[in-house]
Image: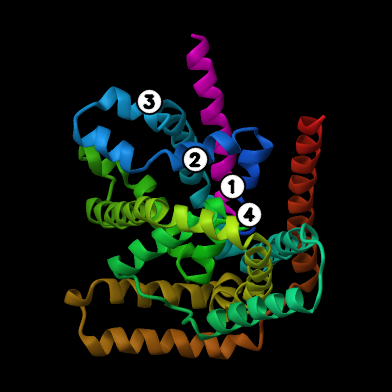
C-alpha cells in the first residue's frame, strides 16, 4: 500500500510536468526539480543504456525493469501522458479562438526563461557577449528561414519528436518550445485531440471517425518513437556538452531563445487572427481544408478555387484586424510572472535543501 501511494504521488508529479510540457517556455525539467524528482528522473533516463538493452534481450525482464527504475518511469510517464492529453484540446481551443492572447502568453513565458538563464551566468565579458550574439543570430536566422508550414511527412514528425525530447535535459527550455520552432506544436496538439475525440474507434463506436483516429494515432506513434530514439541517441551527448562547455552552451541557448521570439510574435499569424475575429472567413478556411483533405471527391480546380477564395478573404480582412494590444500585454505579463514564480519556488527549494 505504501509503495502504491508513493507511485501515485509520482504520477501526480508527472501530471504537473506534463502540464508544463504543453506550455512553451515552461520547462518540465524545472517542475521536476521543484517537485524533488529531477535527480531520480535524469538518473532513470541515463540508466536506459547498453546494459539495459543487454538485460532485455536476454529475457531478464525483472532485472531490466529494476535497472531502469521501471516503476518510477512508468508512473511518471503515465502522469505526463494524462496531463498532455487533458490539456491538448484546451490549448488547441485557445490557439484557434484567442491567438493574440495565447501567443502573447507564450511570448512572456519565453522572455522570462531567457532572462533566468542569463541571470544564472556570471563573469560576463566580451567573449560571453559574442556567444550570446551568436545564439541570437542563430535563433533569428533559423526562425526566419524556417517555413511557416513545415512538412507533415512521418520522417519530419519522427525528427520533431527526437529533437523536442532533448529539451527535457536542457535547463530553461521546453519540448513545446522546440515544436514551436519546428512549426509542429499546433499539429501535434491537433493530433492528440483527434485521438481523444475519436477514441471510440477502438471498440467500434458509431460516433467515432475511425479513419481520423488511426491517422492521428499513427502520427503520435511515430512522434513517440522519435522521442525514444532522441533521448537514447542524444542524451549522453548533451550531458557531455553541458559538462564540458556548460557556460558557453547556456549562453548560446539563452541567445537562441531570445532570437526565436520572432517566431512567437503575437501578431505574426495573420491568418489565425483573421479566422478568430471573422467567423465567415473561418468557415471558408474550414471548407477549403475539408476539400484538400478529400482530393478524391473533388476536382483539382475546385480545391484550388476554394483555397484561393480563402486566401483572398484573409488578405481583405487583414487591415480590419483588432490588434487587442491591451489584452496581449496582460497575457504576456501573466506568462512572464508565471515563470518568475516557478523559478523563485525552485531556488527556494534548492536553498532549503542546501541547509
- Describe the element under mark 4 as helix, strand or loop: loop
Please say whether residue 7 is one of the residues in the magenta stretch.
yes
Comparing marks 1 and 4, which lies closer to the viewer? Answer: 4
Q: Is residue 249 left or right of residue 92?
A: right
Count residues near mark 2 (Cα–Cα under 10 Å), then give few for <14, some for 14-19, many for 20+: many
Q: Which residue is at the front of the view, 233 or 3?
A: 233
Residue at image x 36%, y 43%? 49
Numbered circle sitting on residue 278: none
Q: Which residue is mark 2?
A: 80
Neighbour class for label 1 at 10 Å: few (<14), some, many (≥20)? many
The span from disc 3 to disc 4 (Cα, nearest Å) is 28 Å
Give the extent of the magenta segment: 1-23
Q: Are marks 1 and 2 in contact (CB under 8 Å)?
A: yes
Quick one: label 3, few (<14), some, or many (20+) residues within 10 Å?
Answer: few
Residue 252 lies within the magenta run:
no
SS under mark 2: helix
- The residue at which mark 3 appears reads as 66
Q: Nearer the viewer, mark 1 or mark 3?
A: 3
Amino acid at each position: 500500500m505504501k509503495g502504491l501511494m508513493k507511485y501515485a504521488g509520482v504520477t501526480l508529479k508527472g501530471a504537473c510536468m506534463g502540464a508544463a510540457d504543453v506550455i512553451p517556455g515552461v520547462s518540465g525539467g524545472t517542475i521536476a526539480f521543484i517537485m524533488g524528482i529531477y535527480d531520480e528522473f535524469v538518473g532513470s533516463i541515463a540508466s536506459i543504456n547498453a546494459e539495459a538493452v543487454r538485460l532485455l534481450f536476454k529475457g531478464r525482464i525483472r532485472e531490466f525493469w529494476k535497472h531502469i527504475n521501471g516503476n518510477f518511469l512508468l508512473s511518471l510517464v503515465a502522469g505526463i501522458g494524462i496531463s498532455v492529453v487533458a490539456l491538448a484540446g484546451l490549448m488547441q481551443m485557445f490557439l484557434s479562438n484567442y491567438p493574440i492572447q495565447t501567443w502573447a502568453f507564450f511570448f512572456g513565458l519565453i522572455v522570462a526563461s531567457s532572462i533566468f538563464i542569463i541571470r544564472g551566468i556570471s563573469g560576463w565579458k566580451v567573449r560571453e557577449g559574442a556567444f550570446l550574439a551568436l545564439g541570437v543570430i542563430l535563433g533569428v536566422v533559423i526562425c526566419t528561414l524556417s517555413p511557416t508550414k513545415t512538412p507533415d511527412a512521418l520522417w519530419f514528425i519522427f525528427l520533431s519528436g527526437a529533437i523536442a525530447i532533448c529539451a527535457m535535459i536542457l535547463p530553461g527550455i521546453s519540448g513545446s518550445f522546440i515544436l514551436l520552432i519546428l512549426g509542429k506544436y499546433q499539429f501535434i496538439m491537433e493530433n492528440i485531440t483527434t485521438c481523444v475525440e475519436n477514441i471510440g474507434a477502438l471498440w467500434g463506436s458509431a460516433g467515432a471517425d475511425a479513419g481520423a483516429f488511426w491517422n492521428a494515432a499513427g502520427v503520435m506513434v511515430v512522434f513517440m518513437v522519435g522521442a525514444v530514439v532522441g533521448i537514447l541517441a542524444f542524451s549522453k551527448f548533451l550531458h557531455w556538452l553541458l559538462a564540458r562547455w556548460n557556460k558557453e552552451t547556456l549562453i548560446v541557448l539563452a541567445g537562441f531563445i531570445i532570437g526565436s521570439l520572432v517566431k512567437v510574435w503575437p501578431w505574426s499569424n495573420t491568418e489565425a487572427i483573421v479566422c478568430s475575429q471573422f467567423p465567415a472567413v473561418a468557415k471558408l478556411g474550414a471548407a477549403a481544408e475539408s476539400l484538400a483533405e478529400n482530393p478524391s471527391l473533388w476536382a483539382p480546380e475546385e480545391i484550388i478555387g476554394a483555397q484561393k477564395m480563402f486566401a483572398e478573404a484573409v488578405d481583405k480582412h487583414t487591415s480590419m484586424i483588432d490588434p487587442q494590444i491591451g489584452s496581449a500585454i496582460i497575457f504576456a505579463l501573466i506568462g512572464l510572472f508565471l515563470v518568475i514564480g516557478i523559478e523563485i519556488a525552485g531556488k527556494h527549494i534548492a536553498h532549503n535543501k542546501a541547509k
